[in-house]
Image (spheres, rainbow, N blue to C red):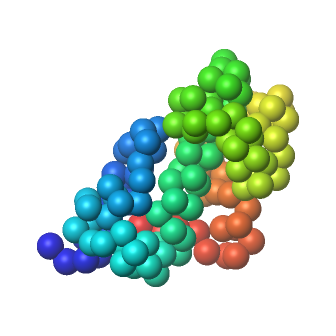
Amino acid sequence: MDELSLLRRARDRIDREYAQPLDVADLARTAHLSAGHFTRRFRAVFGETPYGYLLTRRIERAKTLLRRGDLSVTEVCVQVGATSLGSFSASFSALVGESPSAYRARDHRAAAVIPGCVTRRLGQPVRFREAGRGRSF
């Protein structure tokens, strides 16, 4: 299996298991690479570190759960695999531009008619939209 396929396998694992505790060494084993080499190659191929990708995936999922409005911020924090409400809130605020509570309180009914694929693209954290580079798989 070539390196790109192995990196995709690790990325796909993050997509599937984002709510589980994942560390770089374990993900590197999925790609049959050392942790350092895995991190460098992952960043070169996907534009961000494995941890950054995991954090982004968790925040994207948190936004979806918060838009539903039936879970508290704490419940969403636990469901996406964050271990600390404080660090989850800080990461969410840094990437989204508002706190999870403020995001949850907003009216999201207008977004309900937008197809999921468009919502996902528009819902990417600001750092990707501003840089003009979305992840394309």
* Figure quadrant of residue 102: top right
Count the labels in the image: 0
Viewer-proximal residue among 28 and 66: 28
Quadrant placement of the N terminus: bottom left
| 35 vs 80: above or below | below
Q: Give the camera-side residue of 35 and 2.
A: 35
Residue lying farthest left?
Answer: 1
Q: Is residue 79 left or right of residue 96?
A: left
Q: Residue furthest top?
A: 70
Q: In the figure, 52 relative to 59: above or below?
A: below
Tell me what residue is drawn at x 74 percent, y 71 percent: 130
Instruction: Tell me which corner region of the image, top left, top right, bottom left or bottom right, holds residue 63.
Output: top right
User: On the rendered structure, is 100 left or right of 28?
Assistant: right
- Which of these two is toward me, 57 or 23? 23
Is residue 31 left or right of 84 when viewed as pictured?
left
Residue at x 56% of width, y 45% of height: 58
Where in the figure is residue 49, as x and y percent of width and height? 51, 68
Q: Residue at point 32% right, 55% down?
A: 26
Residue at left 64%, top 57%?
Answer: 124
Residue 42 in sight from this viewpoint: no
Residue 53, position in %: x, y?
52, 60
Q: Is residue 114 above or below residue 29?
A: above
Quarter of the image containing the C terminus? bottom left
Residue 30 image position (x, y, % from top left): 26, 59
Res. 22 visible in picture: yes
- Residue 101: x and y in percent read 81, 32
